[in-house]
Amino acid sequence: MAGMEIWINPACSKCRSAVNLLDAEGAEYTVRRYLEDVPSTDEIREVLDRLGLEPWDITRTQEAAAKELGLKEWPREAASRERWIGALAAHPKLIQRPIITADDGTAVVARTEEAVRDALSR
């Protein structure tokens, strides 16, 4: 999957800021509204590999769904990895945002201007 993609929730100010910065820099990218176009468990695994992170690293544990699931109590270990990935696929609101996949196949969680510029430089 070549090219830059950004996973956004349009209601999220950090997502809008990231998109505005990409536009200001003239970047070519694809937008994925991940709450509507929900990532599969395979896609979440792939993004985690690109980020170099574990699923709990990109989980929004303050969300209502996280509290209902009791996520804070879930073990953060290899044996529980698939359980976390399944929760992210079932409840995409739990996925930290925005995530930008850079042209070189890596990815960043682009919650700051620096992170967006990092993705642009790759």
Image: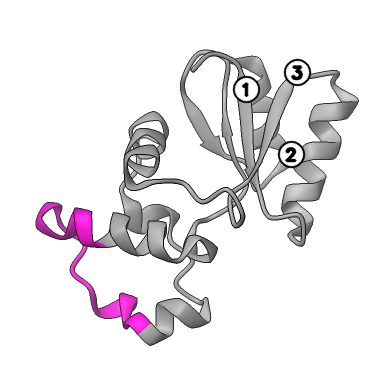
Q: Residues within 10 Å of mark 1 (few under 14, many from 20)?
A: many
Would you say 67 lies left or right of 119 here? Answer: left
Q: Residue at x 75, y 18 (%)?
A: 28
Describe the colour scheme in one phrase: one colour
Disc nearest the viewer among 1 and 2: 1
Residue labelled with disc 3: 28
Q: Considering only vertical position in the picture, is 98 above or below 103?
A: below
Q: Position of residue 67 (x, y in %)?
A: 41, 84
Q: Position of residue 27 (x, y in %)?
A: 78, 19
Q: Position of residue 47 (x, y in %)?
A: 41, 36
Q: Residue at x 50, y 77 (%)?
A: 62
Callouts 3 and 1 close, C-beta under 8 Å: yes
Q: Which residues are magenta?
A: 69-83
Would you say 53 lies left or right of 18 here? Answer: left
Pick whichever, 5 or 114, lies toward us. 5
Q: Residues within 10 Å of mark 2 (few under 14, many from 20)?
A: some
Q: Residue at x 62, y 22 (%)?
A: 4
Residue labelled with disc 2: 113
Element class at badge 3: loop
